[in-house]
Image (spheres, helix red, strand yellow):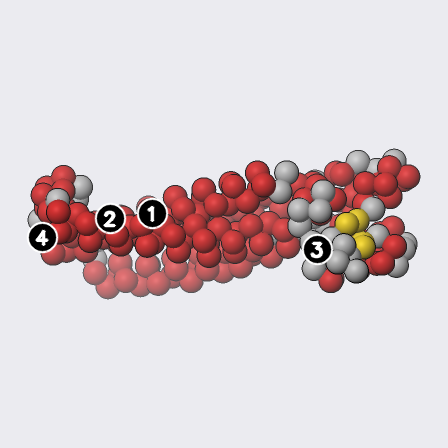
Amino acid sequence: MKNRLKVLRAERDWSQGDLADRLGVSRQSVNAIETGKYDPSLPLAFKIARVFDLPIEAIFQDEAA
Amino acid sequence: MALSPSLRRTLPIVLTLVFALLLGVSVSLVQHPVAFLAWAVISLVATAAASIFCWRALDEVAREAHKTAWMWGGSFGMVVAFLAFIAAEHHWPHLLETGLGGGRSPADLVELGLIGVVSAQLVGYLLVWAGWWIAKR
């Protein structure tokens, strides 16, 4: 699954650590999600959407679709 | 004093490990059989409770790493240990009788088997856990 986390972070001038603190996860976890190596659960995906104030589909795109 | 988010995640893990180690050492120091059993049960329950506390402090990615590590590393380590003991029993029995456990009694051999299997599981777990995080970097 592709995502726009890196772009969205850059727009807000947030580091991975900043986003991790806002999500309540580790920086390593944010890195794994951002690089597409780990797909977050629905609850975490919704939390990410809330943090960026965007709908989930504006952040994550299904590569198979 | 406010703890940083990373410290809030790490502290329960460190405290749980120290707690479990202290309980493990204290259990081995109790001599009376009934007191030993009672303290062992208390230690087990306390360690389980601390582990739940520790688990809840982890985020979902860290939990996934642990689950994957136990599934693949723990299972594979167990199979490797079984095969090693079976091979030793059939082809190199002197290793079991003299070399590894230091004793020949059935109790010594059972202890050797338990420690051997759990150790192999832990090694497998640690290897897969480390590999999982390296792969996700």
Mark 1, other Cα within 10 Å: few <14 / some 14–19 / many ≥20: many
Residue occupying image coordinates x 45% and y 53%:
B72
Tell me the number on the disc at residue B120. Answer: 1
Name the residue tied to disc 3: A40
Q: Dot 2 lies on which element?
A: helix
Whether labels 3 and 1 share one chain: no
Give the farthest residue toward the front.
A64
For the residue pair A52 and B44, the one nearer the viewer reads as A52
Mark with earlier residue (4, 2): 2
Tell me the number on the disc at residue B105. Answer: 4
Inspect the image, locate mark 1, and give the three-letter code of the amino acid beneath it: Ala
Q: Dot 3 lies on which element?
A: loop
Label 3 or label 2, whichever lies nearer to me, is 2
Whether labels 4 and 2 share one chain: yes
| Mark 4–mark 2 distance (CA, rounded to whole Å) | 20 Å
Inspect the image, locate mark 2, and give the three-letter code of the amino acid beneath it: Ala
| Mark 1–mark 2 distance (CA, rounded to whole Å) | 10 Å
| Mark 3–mark 4 distance (CA, rounded to whole Å) | 52 Å
Mark 3, other Cα within 10 Å: few <14 / some 14–19 / many ≥20: many
Inspect the image, locate mark 3, and give the three-letter code of the amino acid beneath it: Pro
Residue occupying image coordinates x 34% and y 47%:
B120
Mark 2, other Cα within 10 Å: few <14 / some 14–19 / many ≥20: few
Q: Are marks 3 and 4 in contact (CB under 8 Å)?
A: no
> Mark 3, chain letter?
A
| Mark 3–mark 2 distance (CA, rounded to whole Å) | 39 Å
| Mark 4–mark 1 distance (CA, rounded to whole Å) | 22 Å
Quadrant that contains the C terminus of chain B: top right
Q: Is residue A42 above or below residue A28?
A: below
Mark with earlier residue (1, 2): 2
Quadrant that contains the N terminus of chain B: top right
On the rendered structure, is A3 left or right of B23?
right
